[in-house]
Image (spheres, rainbow, N blue to C red):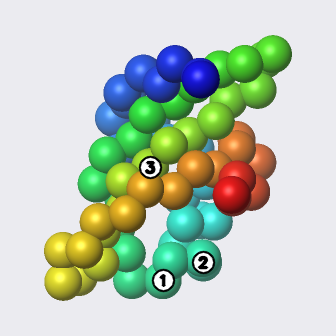
Amino acid sequence: QDEYAKIEVSAVPDAVKSAVEKAYEGQTIKEASVAEKDGAKTYKLVIATAEGTESTVTFNDKGEEIK
């Protein structure tokens, strides 16, 4: 289990933000956390639809979603 530390949404890399916008069009990032393992960062993001439905997604620092 990786340890995630909460970060500001503004601290999420643009590559990750762009990937979220593409994969989850119309959803916004509400919360962000980051974990670092072997020099690679993983971002756990809480995203929300316009209706307020929240879900959690995980991306690597290249903007690739981790299922």
- Measured from the top left, where is residue 47 in percent x and y? 37, 62
Sequence-wise, which precedes: disc 3 or disc 2? 2
- Measured from the top left, where is residue 24 in percent x and y? 50, 77
Residue carrying label 2: 22
- Measured from the top left, where is residue 57 in percent x and y? 51, 56
Q: Nearer the viewer, mark 3 or mark 2?
A: 3
- Pointer 3 and pointer 1: residues touching (CB < 8 Å)? no
The Cα–Cα distance between marks 3 and 2, rounded to whole angstroms, is 15 Å
Neighbourhood count class around disc 3 (C-alpha, 10 Å): few under 14, some 14–19, many 20 upward: many
The Cα–Cα distance between marks 3 and 1, rounded to whole angstroms, is 15 Å
Vertical side of 66 occupied by 47: above or below: below
Q: Residue at x 38, y 29 (%)?
A: 7
Per the image, label 3 sits on a secondary structure element best described as strand
Kindly identify the amino acid type of the residue bearing the numbered disc 1.
Glu
Residue 45: mark in rendering? 3
Residue 58: mark in rendering? none
Residue carrying label 1: 25
- Pointer 1 and pointer 2: residues touching (CB < 8 Å)? yes
Q: Nearer the viewer, residue 15 or 43?
A: 43
Kindly identify the amino acid type of the residue bearing the numbered disc 3.
Leu
Q: Residue at x 58, y 50 (%)?
A: 58
- Measured from the top left, where is residue 18 in percent x and y? 59, 65
Vertical side of 65 occupied by 7: above or below: above
In the figure, is residue 54 to the left or right of 4? left
Q: Residue at x 59, y 22 (%)?
A: 2
- Pointer 3 and pointer 2: residues touching (CB < 8 Å)? no
